[in-house]
Amino acid sequence: MKIVLASLCALALIACAATEPALGSRVEGECKPEPGQRFVGQTATEEVGWKLLAATGARVIRWVPPRTQVTMDFRADRLTVSYNDAMVIERVACT
């Protein structure tokens, strides 16, 4: 019984390791923050949001209003856009 359990655990670990991307490779939908930096200073609108997604390659956008706390979990496909009270984008990051 112990051998079977150990084998199952080993298979589970191998399966997890096999799904990880190779070092230096990009995952489909992975966010690239550099192209999004040109939007800092622009007004946060739906149209700008679509342009940000297209420019960065992210699948998901998270708008962060002023004085809002967000989770610290990391998603390679998520773009986080922080803006101020005047709806001006202050920060664009892949988080």
Image (tube, rainbow, N blue to C red):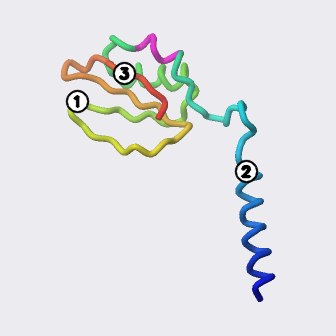
Type of the residue with mark 3? Arg
- Dot placed on the residue nearer the N-terminal end, 2 or 1: 2
* Residue at the image point whose x is 28% and y is 17% from the top: 88
* 49 in relation to 68, above or below: above
- The residue located at (40%, 43%) in the rendering is 72
Residue located 31% across and 15% down the image: 43
Give the amino acid at mark 2. Thr
Residue 54's spot in the image, x, y percent? 55, 23
**Split into 4 quadrants, where in the image is the N terminus?**
bottom right
| Residue 61: x %, y % from top left | 44, 33
Q: Position of residue 34 (x, y in %)?
A: 53, 17
Q: Does dot 1 land on a helix, a strand or a loop?
A: loop
Q: Nearer the viewer, residue 54 or 6?
A: 6
Q: Which residue is mark 2?
A: 19
- Please say if 67 is above or below 4: above
Q: Is residue 63 left or right of residue 13?
A: left
| Cα–Cα gap, marks 2 and 3 | 31 Å
Q: Which residues are magenta?
A: 35-39
Name the secondary structure under disc 3.
strand
Q: CA distance from mark 2 to mark 1?
A: 37 Å
Q: Does the magenta portion include 60?
A: no
Circle on res. 66: 1
Q: In this picture, is 9 found above or below 30?
A: below
Q: Which numbered dot is residue 91?
A: 3
Q: Main secondary structure of the magenta part?
A: helix
Count of picture labels: 3
Residue density around tag 2, few if under 14, some if 14–19, many if 20 or more, within 10 Å = few
x, y (%) of residue 24?
Answer: 71, 30
Whether residue 33 is situated above or below residue 13 in the rendered picture:
above
The residue carrying pointer 3 sits among few (fewer than 14), some (14 to 19) or many (20 or more) residues within 10 Å by Cα, namely some
Left or right? Give the position of 19 relative to 45. right
